[in-house]
Image: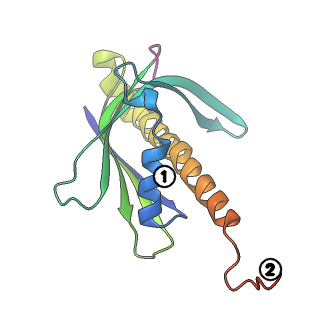
């Protein structure tokens, strides 16, 4: 097993990011069967590698009862160079009110058995980290998009409502 840690800063306040993440977790992802997710990884200018993974998210626990933690695991639908992963997805407060942090931490199993360890040291760890970044990009973009839409629908502060 190899460890993995990635984070993505969100343009969304912490409290709202926690709520939006809870809403974004598809019901299927909390079932034993999981949720099918296609991750695309850039491999060269204009080219990408695409792989389907089955992902399962379950509510986790934070000993401090502050952050929202989800246990997450994924398995590639078919073999190949994609790793299996188990860890946590967490929304954390950032130093600024307007932003928060989406964090993925855990361990992945390099594919291909004994050959996988050598492969992991050369290329595999980059694939695992790129997979984690793509996962955070997909979830983080969804949270930010939904937050922006909410903000756009709010009436302008200080708007003059004299047309009663």
Depicted 151 relative to depicted 80: above or below: below
Q: Is residue 36 left or right of residue 161?
A: left
Location of mark 1 (residue): 20
Decide which of 140, 107 is in the foreground and name it. Answer: 140
Q: Which residue is the extreme one toward the front?
A: 164
Q: Secondary structure at mark 2?
A: loop
Q: Quadrant of the N terminus?
A: top left
x 61%, y 35%: residue? 43
The kind of secondary structure element at disc 1 is helix
State which quadrant residue 7 falls in.
bottom left
Q: Is residue 131 above or below residue 157?
A: above
Q: Residue at x 40, y 75 (%)?
A: 95
Write down the quadrant of residue 124 in the picture: top left
Q: Nearer the viewer, mark 1 or mark 2?
A: 2
Q: How many marks?
A: 2
- What label sits on residue 164 in the rendered view? 2
Q: What label does residue 67 carry, if any?
A: none
Residue 49 image offset from top left, x and y in percent: 60, 28
The kind of secondary structure the magenta stretch mainly shows is: loop
* Crowdedness near tag 1: few (<14), some (14–19) or many (≥20) residues, C-alpha within 10 Å: some
Residue 14 image offset from top left, x and y in percent:
42, 65
Q: Which residues are magenta?
A: 77-81
Q: Is residue 96 above or below residue 143?
A: below
In magenta segment, residue 78? yes
Distance of mark 1 from mark 2, alpha carbons? Answer: 34 Å
Along the polypeptide, which appears first: circle 1 or circle 2? 1
Residue sitting at 44 percent across and 14 percent down? 79
State the image coordinates of residue 118 (x, y, percent, origin top left): 33, 26
């Amino acid at each position: 097993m190899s460890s993995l840690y990635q984070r993505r800063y969100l343009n969304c306040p912490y409290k709202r990011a926690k709520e939006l993440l809870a809403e974004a977790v598809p019901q299927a992802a909390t079932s034993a069967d999981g949720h099918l997710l296609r991750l695309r990884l850039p491999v060269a200018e204009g080219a990408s590698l695409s792989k389907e993974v089955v992902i399962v998210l379950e509510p986790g626990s934070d000993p401090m009862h502050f952050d929202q933690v989800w246990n997450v695991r994924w398995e590639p639908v078919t073999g190949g160079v994609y790793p299996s992963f188990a860890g946590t997805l967490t929304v954390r407060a950032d130093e600024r009110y307007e932003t928060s942090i989406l964090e993925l931490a855990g361990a992945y199993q390099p594919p291909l058995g004994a050959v996988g360890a050598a492969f992991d040291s050369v290329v595999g760890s980059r694939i695992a980290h790129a997979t984690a970044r793509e996962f955070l990009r997909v979830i983080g973009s969804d949270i930010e998009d939904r937050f922006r839409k909410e903000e756009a629908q709010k009436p302008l502060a200080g708007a003059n409502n004299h047309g009663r």
